[in-house]
Amino acid sequence: MFDDALSDERFKKVIEKAIGYYRHSHHDISHVERVYNLALRIAREIGEPVDLDVLRAAVILHDIARSMEDEGVIDDHAAKGAELAREILREAGFEEEKIEKVAYSIASHRFRNGVKPDLIEAQILQDADRLDMIGAIGIARAFARGGWSNTPFYDPAKPPKNNYDGRSETVINHFYEKLLKIKDTLNTEPAKKIAEERHRFMLLFLERFMKEWRGEL
C-alpha cells in the first residue's frame, strides 16, 4: 500500500504514525488507500500542476481524528485532524509551506462543513474522499457504519430529513440525505465522470432494496 510514497523516508514516518489512528472498519486504512488511489488518478487526469507531496500527505492523514469523533471524544474530526497532521508532518521533516497546505486540505474535506476549497490539492482530496462514499464501496461502508452504530436498515415510518445533520435515523435514509447528493458537490471533472456510474449503481441498489423489502422480488 502507498508503494509510490515508501521510497521517501518522510512518508514512511507519516504512514507509520497514521496507521494507528484508523480503528473502525467504515473509516479504516483501506478507506485511506482507496482514496489515495483515486486522488492520484484524478491528479493524473486533471491537466494542471498538483503538488503530490501535499496531496499524498493530506490523503494519508485526512481521517486520523475520525475515530475520536465517532467515539465522542471530539466534535469535528477535520479540524482536529488538521491539528494532528501539523505535528506529524513537522516530526517527519516536511516544509512548513507544505504542512499548511496539507492542514488546509484536511480541514476543508468534510462533507457536512460545506467548504468549497480553492487549493487544487484540497479539491482533489475532497473529491476522492467523497467518491469512496458512493457506488458499491459506498453502499458497503454505509451498512458497515450502520452496524457499528446499531442503526436500522430502513423504517418506512421515518422519512429522510431534508437537510443532513450528521446522523441518519436509518441506513436507507442516509442515501437520500447525503450519498445521493455527493455527485453534485464534486470539484473536478475527472471526479464528476467517475461519480456518474457510482451514482447510477446506488439508484439501482435502492430500487432493488425496496422491491425486496416489500416482497416484490
Image (cartoon, helix red, strand yellow):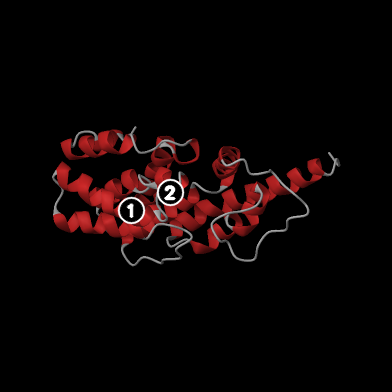
Q: Residue at x 33, y 67 (%)?
A: 118
**Quarter that holds the C terminus:** top right
Q: Residue at x 58, y 39 (%)?
A: 140
Q: Classify 150 as above or below 199.
A: above
**Quarter that holds the N terminus:** top left
How far apart marks 1 and 2 lie (CA) works out to: 9 Å
Q: Which residue is mark 2?
A: 69
Q: Say the numbered circle drawn on residue 198.
A: none
Q: Classify 156 as above or below 20.
A: below
Q: Position of residue 211 (x, y in %)?
A: 80, 45
Badge 1: how crowded within 10 Å, few (<14), some, or many (20+)?
many
Q: Amino acid at mark 2?
A: Glu
Q: Nearer the viewer, residue 42 or 76?
A: 76
Q: Say the numbered circle drawn on residue 80.
A: 1
Q: Nearer the viewer, residue 169 or 49?
A: 169
Q: Position of residue 182 (x, y in %)?
A: 54, 58
The secondary element bearing badge 2 is classed as: helix
Q: Position of residue 14 (x, y in %)?
A: 24, 39
Q: Position of residue 123 (x, y in %)?
A: 37, 60
Q: Amino acid at mark 1?
A: Lys
